[in-house]
Amino acid sequence: MSPKMGRREFLKTTALLGGATLLAAEGAMLTGRSGTAAAAGQDTGEGDYQLAKAKNMIYGVCLQCNTQCTIKGKISNGLVVKLDGNPYSPINCFPQLPYNTPPETAAKVDGKLCPKGQAGVQTLYDPYRLVKVLKRNGPRGSNKWKTISFEQAVKEIVNGGKLFSDIGEDRVVPGFKDVFVAKDAAVFKTLAEDAAKVAGKEMSLADFKSKHAANLDLLVDPDHPDLGPKNNQFIFMAGRIEPGRSDWTKRFVLNSFGSVNWFEHTTICEQSHHVAYKWATAQYSDGKWSPGPNHMKPDFRWSRFVIFWGTGAFEANFGPTPMAEQITRALAEKGLKIAVVDPRFSKTAAHANWWIPVKPGGDLALALGMIQWILANERYDGKALANANRAAAEQDGEKSWTNATWLVKIDQDGQPGAFLRANEAGLVDGDKGKNLFVVSRNGQLVAVDPENKDNPVEGDLFVTAEVNGMKVKSALTILKEQAASKSLEELAAEAGVPADAIVNLAREFTSYGKQAAIDFYRGAVQHTNGYYTAQAIIILNLLIGNMDWRGGLTAGGGSWAAGGGKPGQPFDLGKMHSGKITPWGIKLTREGAYYDRSTLFNGFPAERPWYPLTSDVYQEIIPAAGAGYPYPIKILWLHMGTPVLAAPAGAEQIKILCDTERIPLFIADDIVIGETSMYADYIFPDLTYLERWAFLGAPPSTTTKTTKLRQPIAAPIPETVRVFGEEMPISVEAVMLAIAEALGLPGYGKDGFAPGWDFKRPEDYYLKAAANVAYGDKPGDEVPDADDSELALFKEARRHLPPAVFNEAAWRRAVGEDRWRKTVYVLNRGGRFEESTGSAGKYVEHPFGKLINLYVEPVATTRDSITGRLFGGVPRLEPVSNSDGTPVKDADYPLQLITFKEIFGGQSRTIGNYWGQVALLPENFILMHRSDGARLGLRDGDMVKLISRTNPDGKLDLGPAGVEAVQGKVKLIEGIRPGVIAASWHYGHWAYGARDVVIDGQVIKGDARRRGGLCTNPVLLLDTRMKTTCLTDPIGGSASFYDTRVKVEKV
């Protein structure tokens, strides 16, 4: 690209739907066809390096993967030409620059960034980016489109009607106005309260109908009022959404529109990991358990021994950019030892002392075997486990404590259930006794208040007793019995490893005091028994008492509350919502709700599974809409997601998406035409992470307090539109604002936040969050004011941004003049970052300092909605199963399929990164052990097709778009467990620029490079009972990615 070519001229050659030509030739600089792209626009003839000047950079946050690194974007001639790490941030520069370092100084220091992060420029300037709104011009999935104006598109989706009569569809399509029916906040609230009474059998259905006769037409089903209002027939389904945008969209969906159906994608990533941690960290107050943090990690810099279980430090996880340095330094400087549990010999395994090639799905047996050996050989920290409350922990120098000694009631069938309460034991009467637990100390019962700071209570570890006619056991006793339900040799056989390997790993793990820990993630938990596996691994950490200790387990450094609500923060965004309503009803996926407590309960099994202990069951959203259970839907909005590609068994979802009766209106916002948005009725262009806002914390591997601020670095690609009289680029925010304006939704427009505080632009929301971060979590915690030079720099660095994005007067108004300088201070640094003072002696810098649950009462008292069986409070050995409990065998299919990620690949967006993924590995392979290859007569490079029991043809039916074969090339290696095959993710696209599309009658040619390799998800198993959804963990909700057995057939 010529240094003199400006942004406007450049985009004319790269933007889809730009100007008169729909797709101009890809610019050589952005496609990897030029050999000297890196220096484009950098040499201005001034004799110095312009990209090391603060005026030519803006700090932001990456989103090429979910590590979401802090970055700096370097700008030349109005274009982003280089991305590097933010030196203020410990995520990308360790040790980081002091927070008060002037931006001019920081500009000369680049933090580290991984390959896909650096290739993000090509995500931004992808030649297949959408600029205008597309409306389908043929059957769903036909890839025939026409452009329409933003204003016309909004009018159509709001008002509905015969929107596709011009292509022969005579149906009336519902619009948002047809679904936004319950509007009166008072009526909304009363209906919710009384519907709950009906479900709780406190009010009869007849009385409910009589009382609310005038408003029964507002309900999805008046015979089942607990399903909620018709507003719930609007479904918002988000893929890679992150804090900031999640808060924004929840405000629209939940608290303005009044639909309970807001979802993100976590169950296809690692949800059972999160759910296990949330219940392990749950706290008890006022008679109920409230879930806690969903993620903890080893304090890598100080650990002496770490087990990476189904994850690693150098490929995926949260994430390689910070963790690679932490691990490498610990290996080189402190003698860290590593074990890796993974069927595949990963890059982390290559640096490890031990590799345990566990059988996929055998992780639970391996963890239970370790627990069995540790308990039998007394290799646990009995002193820490005996502490039953805060005072006891503090007395022993512990920051956290467990419920290992609390007594659990055992029913007549021997099933552990709820904890024994002090009133049941006759220790404390009345309501107070209902909220106190019980331990046995030297044979005497003692009431326990977990948070009591004054009266230390310790309990006996192993107890079996009878109290007032009730059989009870300590939680640790129940765990010991479960772990010993099979012999160590039997567990080893289930895990697919020698018994000696379990013993040696357990012995090593318990040989470093509190300076050992286990890091686990997706590989261990994306199974139908994933929750129990996650719980077992968390318990292994608890057994050695490593929580909050330096080198042990840490919850991380935390973050400043961008949403407000802390003392001294100027904007409580949750409360600043004129006319705010609280959504109610049962979610489409039945998550967070109990089947046997609903009006739909008619004995076990339920029609489809309910998921009371988890959330965001992504793989079930579209199938539930297809089944119309628990109710039919009207509108599906897909945001930044592609479930057809990313979820297992997408062919069934394609069939449902193509059914206009099941999903009457399907809209999407996307940066390209994706594998799922290709089935939409309308696609609205969206912004990439380099063009928009967000605020988010850091993963626990960052042990200092951190809040990252994403802000527009690049001028937007989508066209500019006007909403509420304000100019802005098309995005999910613009569409929501436009719908809010059309419907008059509460909380938007003039005085949308509060009197004098309008909500008309995206910045009206996001800048308030930035101001909250600037003011900190308590009085006196605020950052300094930006001085005049920083204010001038802030403005100059944004000289390339159009007024639709950077309008200084509007930005100042969003926070108020008195808060502007502090807001600029944090934006000039890309967030707020605590400076490390080093670990506080024996402990991590920010201890969790609370109860950790070895036994999880909410799980133990919940029944499976299909089998009617109670779940377990401690992990129990469960085979890989269908939802009705029938084990998955498939012995006729000799190979077990797993996936993984390369360091240069993201979930779905990196296929357009020609500098990164395509240059480094143009296609993925089916990795197979050499012995399996020899047995099957296969050689390197042979093309094979994958087939499974639920996909015996090894094909994916795309509907009108044709059929794709699930096939790829074999690569024979030693570094994988025999009987297991693996394929890396992020390949095998059939959209995202990989396929020809027709727009306004013109054919836009696809790029064959984007079709390279294969995606294995189409052959993953369907649940035999549900038939349209994959195998799923009934507790954690995780989609099963590693429980499918396949055959390979040479093509």
Image (cartoon, rainbow, N blue to C red):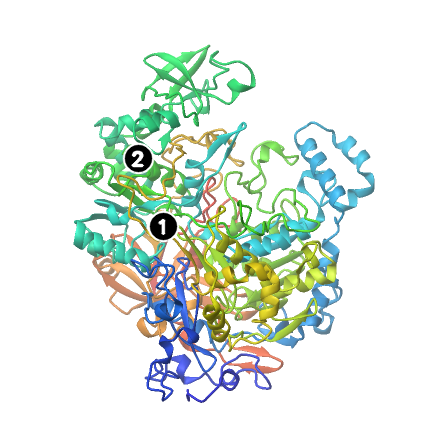
**Disc 2 residue crowd, few under 14, some 14–19, many 20+, Cα 10 Å:** many
Q: Name the residue under label 1.
A: 704
Q: In which quarter of the image is the N terminus?
A: bottom left
Nearer to us in this view, 877 or 888: 877
Q: Do the residues labelled 1 and 2 touch (CB within 8 Å)?
A: no
Q: In which quarter of the image is residue 344?
A: bottom left
Are there few (<14), some (14-19), or many (20+) residues within 10 Å of tag 1?
A: many
Q: Is residue 2 above or below residue 434?
A: below
> Which amino acid type is shown beneath numbered disc 1?
Thr
Q: Which residue is drawn at 16% across and 49% down?
A: 335
In this orientation, does residue 213 appear? Answer: yes
Judged from the image, the secondary structure of the residue bearing numbered disc 2 is helix
Q: In this view, does 533 lie to the left or right of 938?
A: right
First of labels 1, 2 by sequence position? 2
Residue at which label 2 appears: 368
Looking at the image, is mark 1 or mark 2 nearer the viewer?
1
Picture layout, residue 952 above or below residue 1001: above
Rendered residue at 51%/67% (across/down): 674
Q: Is mark 1 on a helix, strand or loop?
A: loop
Q: Nearer the viewer, residue 233 or 703?
A: 703
Residue 19 to residue 275: above or below: below
**Residue 477 point in image, percent of width and height:** 34, 23
Q: Where is residue 908 in the image (x, y as percent from the top left)?
A: 44, 64
Q: Can see residue 668?
A: no
